[in-house]
Amino acid sequence: MAHDFDLFVIGGGSGGVRAARIAAGHGARVAIAEEYRFGGTCVIRGCVPKKLLVYASRFRDEFEDARGFGWTVGPHTFDWATLIANKDREIARLEKIYRSGQVRAGVTVFDERAVLDGPNAVRLVKQGRTVTAAKILIATGGRPNIDVNLPGHEHVITSDDAFQLLQLPKRVVVAGGGYIAVEFACIFHGLGAETTLIYRGEKILRGFDEDMRNELTEEMTKRGIRVLTRDVFSRVEKTSLGLKGHLKGGGTLEADQIMFAIGRSPNSAGLGLDAVGVKTGPAGAIIVDERSCSSVPSIFAVGDVTDRVNLTPVAIREGHSFADREFGGKPWSADYAMIPTAVFSTPEIGTVGLSEADAAARLGDLDIYKSRFRPMKATLSGRDEKTILKLVVDRASQRVVGCHVLGHETAEIVQMAAIAMRMGATKADFDATMALHPSVAEELVTMHERHVPPAEAAE
């Protein structure tokens, strides 16, 4: 009882609340401090509200497609205020669940900012007092980046702000080429905004498989989203008609809102890390080992503040493994292999494992299997769209090391494929699995013809 608590968690997001609850379940005396709302980025201003907006943005397609199936759809309108109000109500419900889960687990909850005041001390800023803990876990997540050197940066918004807009912009420009930028471009366009996506790189979604990047760009363009690459803003100007973004490559983009989605940084500023000797990387990420332990033995960190793999399920696993290891006598660590992920664009991308380029660099010779077709629903709706499935196979072992799918609800497909791939499934295992017909996913077990690239075919 030398300390007030066995564990003090700073940050009430996905990783923090999981660690606190599991540690308390092991009998530890746990406290958690959250200065804003429980649930963190994912629940409050990330995955969950974004997915709700994604659903909303896809109804326009459903109304249009219904005619091909014999339905007569009358006049319909969209009301942004109703969507945001309903979204806010759902987020409030979830936040209450996250908070009450801590209380039920016996965790002491502090609704305020907490900062380090020593290797075993935390200062509660609002109360102005210090409490002590044998171990401290930092789980403060990340924050959206803004280029503060860009003239006029005060006129742009981030994804955090987009969830609270009072009205849907008629014209919107999204700057960035990652998950968030692509998803919001599709959301705004689906809800009726004239949408432009601008990205400094050659192609959107750096790090994803090339076929997925190319095909999604084509599908977004066909839908009417303007995709500009190899360019950035030089300044943003506020005008009587809205905003005018001046491009380094020349020309301008006019919009009612300009949203920056140019990455996120670890939310570590002002926590007192330097004062207690916690080492950080160039971007402020807390440097940790496989145990999530920092350079100070009593201070740990999980989730986006460590800038390892910045995904909600990863933060949850890191928090859980930390609590089990430090308080439950169950030593295990989060496994970062075969993490499935999705881009909730329209159409969406589901992916797990290695891209073709990464697999070739690591493994050498590969067998590639592809299927590209018009989905059944589009045959009656008349929609011009394609579904693409791709398997990347290590030629030597025949193990499936990459699965990439673009189309409707592909995240659901890839989640299940990830189980087989984690177990080491080979292409023969996929081939031996009976197909579920008619479905998109059956293509994963019926692709038998190896794709031969043009260069290899010419030999």
Image (cartoon, helix red, strand yellow):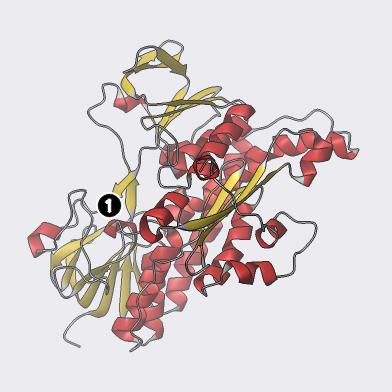
Q: Residue 308 location, x and y as percent?
A: 31, 59
From the viewer's side, name the closer residue of 107 and 292: 292
Work out which residue is located at the far front of the displayed protein and give it: 459
Q: Residue at x 23, y 54 (%)?
A: 268
Q: Amino acid at mark 1?
A: Asn
Q: Residue at x 72, y 33 (%)?
A: 384
Q: Residue 242's image quarter? A: top left
From the viewer's side, name the closer residue of 152 and 6: 152
Q: Residue 401 location, x and y as percent?
A: 49, 63
In the image, residue 146 above or below residue 457:
above
Q: Residue 290 location, x and y as percent?
A: 27, 72
In the image, residue 265 above or below residue 66:
below
The crowding category of the residue bearing disc 1, from other C-alpha atoms within 10 Å (few below 14, some 14 to 19, many at least 20), is many
Q: Residue 346's image quarter? A: top right
Instruction: Pick the quarter of the image with the N terminus.
Output: bottom left
Q: Which residue is mark 1?
A: 267
Res 413 visible: yes
Q: Residue at x 32, y 51 (%)?
A: 142
Q: Is residue 420 left or right of residue 200?
A: right
Determine the secondary structure under disc 1. Answer: loop
Q: Residue 246's image quarter? A: top left
Q: Is residue 211 left or right of residue 337?
A: right
From the viewer's side, name the closer residue of 95 and 129: 95
Q: Residue at x 37, y 26 (%)?
A: 230
